[in-house]
Image (cartoon, coloured by chain):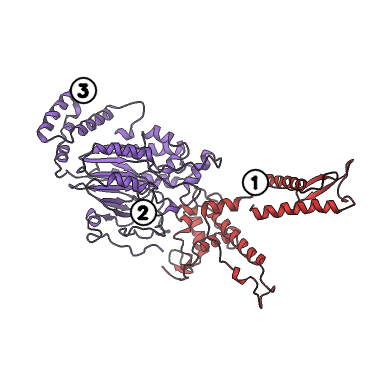
């Protein structure tokens, strides 16, 4: 989880605490013990903490509530930093920068492009490529029976040449797309099970491989 | 079996013989021929006294006399196998079969090489079982064997099992007038303690060629000091052949095709007239020359690496792009011919393809003569 998201959760919990401050009536859902308490819920809509109504309504107490929620969330999501770790280890190419579109948007579907739009486009695209990297580097995720992963022949996706597809592959007897070669590699050198074309792992692998060749001119059919 | 292949607690008759002979060679190196014959006769008597009677012929080192005079060496060949990356057999039998193929290759060489050099990364994840399996397979090599360590052998138990099996990770020896040095060039700075990594996690991180969490490889100050001292006794006219697992120069940091203190090590080697460095790790045909030093890579028996996107030395003629439909393409082993002048021709025995030879004359001429045949399909 990055710092911005963490901060957002803190703010949310603080806001909830502040709201409780303004509210004269106890929350209906809170099964009130003697002194009365209320339930504060995290934005995942699952994680909760009971807060006594007598709690001083200060920022410091609000912080405690948010820390308690985050601690619970982190404990139940031990893999929460997978994306950060994957990026640190394998330095995946970031997608194109679209910030110059902010404030423009004539004839776009949703009107003017906002910074949030640009952020979402980037995050979602990047997440797919980063997940692809984690599959690419893991024999387990690829289902390899012999502990072989893609990076063992293609560090940082080198020599995967996605720009050269589609091309006629005599060994396959037909025109191969990038995903056909990915599947060939999974089946043979990796010795795993082939992926369906729309399998999330296949889509992510394609995203990662294309990300790593960002900027290379397309040249389909190149041998 | 020679010193590098010895077991730690027992010294066979052969081992003691080789050690005694090496000691004698070392002492003889700077003598002129007349004094040499005198000392040599003394050595024969000494050898007889300790009971090494079967090996009298070895104590007539004509080659060393030549080396002492700075004249031509007899010339010889040695073979190499490298980067087998063994898992245990039940995990991955393919890599095991590929190492067996290489062992067959060197055992079928006729004439036999003077010795076989193993270039590191015998194991994939540094486990005892992997190293033991490798040691067992390498025992069937007929020629004497010299071992070098790679990062895949080291970072599970920090070299403990490798040292038990094969002895110290850096050492030197002399053979037919050439001084050989074996380095441990894959020292990494501690990235694991602060991260609270287990030995398996540490090993797994280092095992990822493109994993940026690990540190850069280096020989390190203590070993450079050892090297300086080792070379002190060696005259500059003696040909030098150095083995390192990582290339002893800076090619491409993101894949650790790199030795961080390469310049410092090169500085120790530059005073010699003829220096060759042979390295593993890069799994490809790789050629370089820096000043006096000629560099050659070694092939892997496990998988080929692509060429790095940057930093390829201009003298490198690439091997053909491996064909993924042809298993074992881009893999192989090879041999090294040491000429009378102490420089070497490097043969890459590419399985399933024509071999590639990179001659000393190609490097000495700065690429002007004897260029290897360029591939039809270079890297993308």
- Label 2 resides on the chain identified as B
| Residue B318 percent across, percent down from the top left | 34, 59
Which chain corresponds to the colour red? A
Identify the residue under disc 1.
A78
Tell me if residue A151 comes above or below residue B131 in the rendering.
Answer: below
> Which residue is denoted by mark 2 in the rendering?
B284
Q: Residues within 10 Å of mark 1 (few under 14, many from 20)?
A: few
Q: Kindly identify the residue that appears in the image at 24 percent across and 29 percent down.
A: B20
Which residue is labeled 3 in the image? B51
Cα–Cα gap, marks 2 and 1: 40 Å
Mark 1 or 3, closer to the camera: 1
Residue B280, x across and y down, in percent: 36, 47
| Chain assignment, label 1 | A
Rendered position, A25 above or below B186? below
Q: What is the x, y in percent for residue A94? A: 55, 61
To the question of a shared chain for discs 2 and 1, the answer is no
Mark 3 Cα within 10 Å, few/some/many (few <14, many 20+)?
few
Q: What kind of element bears circle 2? A: loop
Residue B2 rendering spot, x and y as whole percentages: 29, 34
């Amino acid at each position: 989880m990055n710092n911005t998201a963490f901060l957002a959760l803190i703010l949310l919990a603080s806001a909830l605490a502040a709201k409780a401050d303004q509210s004269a009536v106890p929350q209906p859902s809170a099964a009130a013990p003697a002194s009365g308490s209320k339930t504060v819920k995290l934005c995942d809509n699952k994680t909760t903490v009971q807060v006594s109504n007598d709690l001083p309504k200060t920022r410091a107490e609000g912080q405690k509530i948010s820390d308690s929620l985050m601690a619970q969330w982190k404990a139940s999501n031990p893999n929460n930093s997978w994306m950060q770790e994957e990026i640190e280890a394998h330095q995946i190419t970031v997608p194109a920068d679209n910030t110059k579109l902010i404030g423009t948007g004539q004839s776009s579907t949703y009107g003017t492009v906002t910074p949030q739009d640009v952020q979402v486009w980037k995050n979602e695209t990047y997440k797919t490529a980063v997940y692809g990297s984690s599959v690419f580097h893991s024999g387990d995720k690829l289902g390899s029976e012999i502990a072989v992963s893609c990076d063992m022949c293609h560090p940082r996706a080198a020599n995967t040449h996605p720009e050269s597809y589609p091309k006629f592959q005599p060994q396959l007897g037909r025109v191969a797309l990038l995903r056909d070669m990915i599947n060939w590699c999974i089946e043979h050198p990796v010795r795993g099970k082939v992926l369906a074309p729309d399998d999330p792992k296949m889509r992510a692998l394609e995203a990662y491989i294309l990300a790593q060749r960002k900027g290379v001119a397309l040249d389909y059919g190149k041998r | 079996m020679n010193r590098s292949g010895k077991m730690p607690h027992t010294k066979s008759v052969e081992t003691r013989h080789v050690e005694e002979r090496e000691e004698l060679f070392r002492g003889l190196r700077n003598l002129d021929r007349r004094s040499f014959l005198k000392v040599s006769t003394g050595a024969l008597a000494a050898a007889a006294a300790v009971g090494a009677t079967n090996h009298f012929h070895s104590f007539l080192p004509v080659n060393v006399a030549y080396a002492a005079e700075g004249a031509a060496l007899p010339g010889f060949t040695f073979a190499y196998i490298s980067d087998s990356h063994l898992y245990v057999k039940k995990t991955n039998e393919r890599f095991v079969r590929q190492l067996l193929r290489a062992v067959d290759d060197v055992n079928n060489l006729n004439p036999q090489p003077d010795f076989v050099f193993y270039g590191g990364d015998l194991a994939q994840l540094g486990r005892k079982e992997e190293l033991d399996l490798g040691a067992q397979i390498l025992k069937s090599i007929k020629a004497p064997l010299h071992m070098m360590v790679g990062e895949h052998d080291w970072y599970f138990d920090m070299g403990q099992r490798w040292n038990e099996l094969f002895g110290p990770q850096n050492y030197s020896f002399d053979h037919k007038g050439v001084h050989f040095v074996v380095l441990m060039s894959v020292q990494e700075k501690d990235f694991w303690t602060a991260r609270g990594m287990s030995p398996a996690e540490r090993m797994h991180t280092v095992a990822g060629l493109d994993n940026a969490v690990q540190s850069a490889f280096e020989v390190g100050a203590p070993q450079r000091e050892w090297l300086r001292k080792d070379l002190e006794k060696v005259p500059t006219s003696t040909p030098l052949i150095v083995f390192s697992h990582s290339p002893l120069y800076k090619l491409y940091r993101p894949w650790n095709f790199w030795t961080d203190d390469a310049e410092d090590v090169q500085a120790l080697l530059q005073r010699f007239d003829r220096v060759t460095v042979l390295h593993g790790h890069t799994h490809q045909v790789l050629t370089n020359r820096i000043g006096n030093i000629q560099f050659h890579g070694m092939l892997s028996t496990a998988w080929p690496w692509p060429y790095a996107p940057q930093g390829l030395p201009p003298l490198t003629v690439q091997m053909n792009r491996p064909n993924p439909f042809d298993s074992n393409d881009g893999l192989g082993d090879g041999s090294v011919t040491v000429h009378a002048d102490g420089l070497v021709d490097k043969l890459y025995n590419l399985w399933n393809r024509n071999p590639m030879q990179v001659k000393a004359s190609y490097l000495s001429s700065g690429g002007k003569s004897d260029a290897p045949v360029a591939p039809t399909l270079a890297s993308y």
